[in-house]
């Protein structure tokens, strides 16, 4: 292993899996391991993650990828970078003990607190400061929920994201990066600092939040006891790399205006970059969220679907007759489906709608089913619906960027489905460039750690060293199918958005669905 030169280790603390990887300085993946991120159900907190179980999983993954042969010195790991699910967090006491479970981004426990926060400030002023609109996902709402139930939990505690917590267990130092800090709704991206007056407005101590630094800035060296236990070099620098999607965008080469990344997984996200500038009312109207990029001097924009691949998994369960439909069967059914559009409109709102028209009340729907439609058409319609939703985000982003977006780099597990890729290209009219690695977030975190350790001067040198963006497979649109999909999108998918949303918000619908 030493023949590969400098090594970089990264951790990705994800919603469904935790992963660790070892890369060389050229970005080559040498080792990779993953474990399930196990959810628990707590009577007080609902669905959540156990901090000790999460740390045990992370520690086991580090041992697995960093392990040297018996009797040998630790591998020459120059730095460790950690990324993770952005809004998931917990309270840690001054003694280092977790005071709460990790409250996940998808938990709706803080809905009422998010509504209160929204009513307390001017929507545009808060957006200009944070890049966000109030949501149950964010740390500030969760902290208010915790205070209402057990105010003593907050005394002398710190709010850490999942990635921050793993870094804390490795180093004993509490800190975060700008991309994760911003997902609390308490951090000013326009000033790169915690918004103390806003935090105090809700009766909270700004000291609840740890020091925030640029993405990848070294937090501290690994503690001697942790390094020995995990087979790491003593004092190896540990960096909080940040938001998983922003790290993935760095690895995908989506770090210039007009270059975007589509991360295809259970949830799907489009991410692009803008020069750092004040946010405008047009940015607010886009429905996108914004934050400080891992690349200095830049902002990222982001929009996504909470249930993109999740819609596919839902339908696999629904069609499986008691057992989930095998993935090979999914591909065979899609291969048998006609090449032209199904004509079925699927709205992928199993968990509500995000950008560009955020609406937590929105529901999923199929429209246009006919007697001749079967399993193949339903599966294809779900892929078409997720592609339509991502097209709405792409069009909103073009307005914000003031320039066309004609190509995207795609990463994630969804890239293994060639039918999905072709549908996305046909719907958008864009050329998709398929990244060589599905583990883009891990690579991005490793590159940011390498920058922190001085292996690379900056993001551009890191990307060049890792050959980011080269030799990608291209998937282009079919002109005839694109025109057919364009008409379905504009005259059907978008035209029916408001009537459907009015129905979901109606008292009669809410009463009926509650029965």
Image (spheres, rainbow, N blue to C red):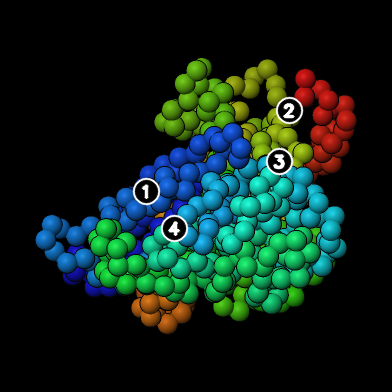
Q: Earlier in the sequence, mark 4 or mark 1?
A: 1
Disc 2/disc 3 C-alpha distance (Å): 21 Å
Residue 56: mark in rendering: 1
Label 4 vs label 3, nearer the camera: 4
Callout 2: helix, strand or loop?
loop
Residue 255 image point, x, y percent: 55, 70
Residue 352: mark in rendering: 3
Q: Quadrant of the N terminus?
A: bottom left
Q: Is residue 74 above or below residue 276?
A: above
Disc 3/disc 1 C-alpha distance (Å): 33 Å
Judge the density around disc 2: few (<14), some (14-19), many (≥20) Cα neighbours within 10 Å: few
Q: Nearer the viewer, residue 140 or 471?
A: 140
Label 4–label 3 contact, CB within 8 A:
no
Residue that carries the numbered disc 2 in the rendered image: 368
Residue that carries the numbered disc 4 in the rendered image: 166
Judge the density around disc 3: few (<14), some (14-19), many (≥20) Cα neighbours within 10 Å: some
Residue 19 image point, x, y percent: 39, 51
Which residue is depicted at the point 66% across and 71% down?
194
Label 3–label 1 contact, CB within 8 A:
no
């Amino acid at each position: 292993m030493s023949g590969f030169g400098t090594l970089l280790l990264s951790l990705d603390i994800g919603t469904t899996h935790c992963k660790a990887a070892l890369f060389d300085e050229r970005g080559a993946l040498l080792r990779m391991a993953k474990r399930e991120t196990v959810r628990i159900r707590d009577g007080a907190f609902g669905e959540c993650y156990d901090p000790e179980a999460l740390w045990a999983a992370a520690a086991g993954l580090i041992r697995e990828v960093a392990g040297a042969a018996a009797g040998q010195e630790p591998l020459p790991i120059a730095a460790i970078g950690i990324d993770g699910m952005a809004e998931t967090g917990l309270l840690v006491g001054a003694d280092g003990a977790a005071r709460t479970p990790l409250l996940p981004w998808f938990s709706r426990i803080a809905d009422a607190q998010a509504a209160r926060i929204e009513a307390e400030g001017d929507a545009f002023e808060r957006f200009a400061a944070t890049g966000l609109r109030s949501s149950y996902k964010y740390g500030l709402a969760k902290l208010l929920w915790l205070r209402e139930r057990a105010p003593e939990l907050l005394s002398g505690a710190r709010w850490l994201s999942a990635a921050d917590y793993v870094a804390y267990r490795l180093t004993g130092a509490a800190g975060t990066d700008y991309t994760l800090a911003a997902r609390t709704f308490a951090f000013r991206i326009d000033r790169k600092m915690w918004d103390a007056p806003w935090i105090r407005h809700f009766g909270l101590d700004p000291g609840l939040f740890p020091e925030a630094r640029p993405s990848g800035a070294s937090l501290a060296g690994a503690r001697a006891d942790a390094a020995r236990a995990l087979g790491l070099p003593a004092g190896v620098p540990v960096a909080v790399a940040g938001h998983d999607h922003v790290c993935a965008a760095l690895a995908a080469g989506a770090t210039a205006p007009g270059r975007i990344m589509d991360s295809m997984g259970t949830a799907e996200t489009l991410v692009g970059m803008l020069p750092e500038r004040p946010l405008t009312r047009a940015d607010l109207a886009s429905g996108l969220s914004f934050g400080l990029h891992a690349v200095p001097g830049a902002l990222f924009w982001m929009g996504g679907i909470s249930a993109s691949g999740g819609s596919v998994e839902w339908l696999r369960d629904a069609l499986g007759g008691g057992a989930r439909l095998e993935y090979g069967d999914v591909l065979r059914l899609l291969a048998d489906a006609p090449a032209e559009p199904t004509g079925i409109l699927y709205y992928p709102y199993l968990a509500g709608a995000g950008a560009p028209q955020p609406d937590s009340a929105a529901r999923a729907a199929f429209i246009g089913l006919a007697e001749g439609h079967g399993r193949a058409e339903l599966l294809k319609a779900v892929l078409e619906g997720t592609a339509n939703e991502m097209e709405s985000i792409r069009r909103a982003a073009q307005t914000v960027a003031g320039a066309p977006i004609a190509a995207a780099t795609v990463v994630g597990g969804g890239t293994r489905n060639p039918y999905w890729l072709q549908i996305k290209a046909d719907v958008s009219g864009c050329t998709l460039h398929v990244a060589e690695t599905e583990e883009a977030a891990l690579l991005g975190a490793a590159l940011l750690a390498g920058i922190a350790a001085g292996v690379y001067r900056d993001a551009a040198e890191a990307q060049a060293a890792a050959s980011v963006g080269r030799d990608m497979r291209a998937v282009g649109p079919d002109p005839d199918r694109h025109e057919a999909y364009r008409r379905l999108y504009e005259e059907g998918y978008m035209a029916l958005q408001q009537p459907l949303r009015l129905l979901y918000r109606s008292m009669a619908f809410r009463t009926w669905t509650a029965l």
